[in-house]
Amino acid sequence: MTALDEIKGIATSAIHQREGPIMLDALNSLKVCALFYAGLKLRLPDGWYKLTEPICRDPDFVSVDNVMLAEIQKQKIWMELKIFRLYQAIFTDSLNDFRGACYMVAIHTREMAEQALKCQRSEIVYLAIKFFNTYLRAVINARDIRTGYNIIKQYRLIAEAALQHQDEAVVLEIAQYFRYYSLTAYKAGLLFLTETFAFDLLLLAQSCCKAKSTMNQNILEIFLRIDQDAESEQQESTLRGVRKSQAKLAAFYLMCGDLPLARIIYQDMNNEPNTRLKIIQDELQSSRPDFWEFTDRGEDFYYVEPSLRPFLMEFFSWFDISPTSQYPSKEGQLNLAPN
């Protein structure tokens, strides 16, 4: 563990001195250790997993509750927990400052979760989920919108990997956490994060639909519970953003021939004011394929592909709103990039 702490110390020093290559090398060293250990783990004796006194005195374990320590020993995950705690410390230290370190921590955490899914090590998958939740809490507390914008995608990719491995429990759990942290971000005034969660839930719902998953409706029900009533102009914009993602999903369901799920979205949106629905329709129809500034994700949340536009028109035809042209000349509201 001393060697791991030294790697963390190198990473922290590099962050403070803004030495990007050294920081990346240190983070990669932690990942290499984690993946090497994963391949070696099944060959280790049972005694290796016991939480001995030196381990319990380690700074990353000394404050952990005894009940949790017993569970850690039972699940044989003390080494993975140690590595994740080091990642957490680096992540927290880098918020609003050296965001590249935060992004790499999220990527490495996702890669470790994907490896665990392949090896059917559910205890490591859920440990990675717990730390992604910890990262999101730190993001919200530090009000670091840009970091949140980027790591939410990495979190969603774990859910999509779980979908490929037919681990529906993991997919649903991550979707539930998306809703929880979306609402938490909304209450904290980090409204762009709420729109980001909505967009990534849209992509996850589309992946479930393509995979013909049995949990399509479960994911949809979670998705429809992330919007909140607007009390300010900025919140109104965010609510429209969430509703735009939901409308895009309805159009996608129609394209896939899943009318019942599209109707569920219609029923949820049917009480919206006509003015709001009209603006949502116009903004979606005037969207562009990519964002006009460089971002790491490079996505316009509200772009509607040409193949999807007829189904979007069909969806909005269900509402009692005045018709709009399919390609309005007036550009819709801007999808603001994260700060």
Image (cartoon, rainbow, N blue to C red):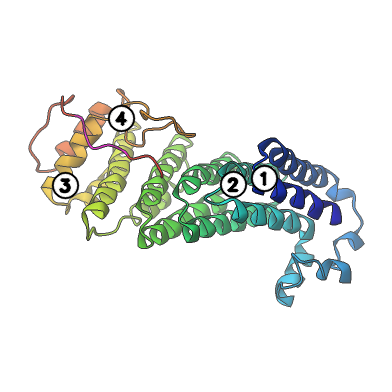
Q: Position of residue 102 (x, y in %)?
A: 59, 46
Find the residue positioned furthest to the bottom. Answer: 66
Q: Nearer the viewer, mark 4 or mark 1?
A: 1
| Disc number lying in front (2 or 4) | 2
In the picture of the structure, the residue carrying the numbered disc 1 is 17
Please, what is the three-letter code of the amino acid marked with disc 1? Gln
Looking at the picture, which amino acid does disc 4 mark?
A: Val
Among the two numbered marks 1 and 3 on one chain, the one whose residue lies closer to the N terminus: 1
- Determine the residue located farthest toward the front in the rendered image: 17
Q: Main secondary structure of the magenta part?
A: loop
CA distance separating discs 4 and 1 = 43 Å
Are circles 3 and 2 on residues that touch, CB within 8 Å? no
The answer to whether 201 appears left or right of 57 in the picture is left
Label 3 element class: helix
Q: Residue at x 76, y 72 (%)?
A: 62
Q: How many marks?
A: 4
Earlier residue among tags 1 and 2: 1
Label 2 – label 4 distance at C-alpha: 31 Å
From the viewer's side, name the closer residue of 212 and 29: 29
Q: Residue at x 32, y 31 (%)?
A: 303
Marks 3 and 2, how far apart at CA: 37 Å
- Judging by the rendered image, the residue that carries numbered circle 4 is 304
4 or 1: tag closer to the N-terminus: 1
- Quarter of the rendering containing residue 92: bottom right
Instruction: Identify the amino acid type marked 2.
Output: Cys
Residue most toward the left? 322
The magenta stretch is 331-335
Residue 332, picture quadrant? top left
Name the amino acid type tagged 3: Arg
Q: Which residue is mark 3?
A: 276
Residue 32 sits in quarter? top right
Marker disc for residue 102: 2
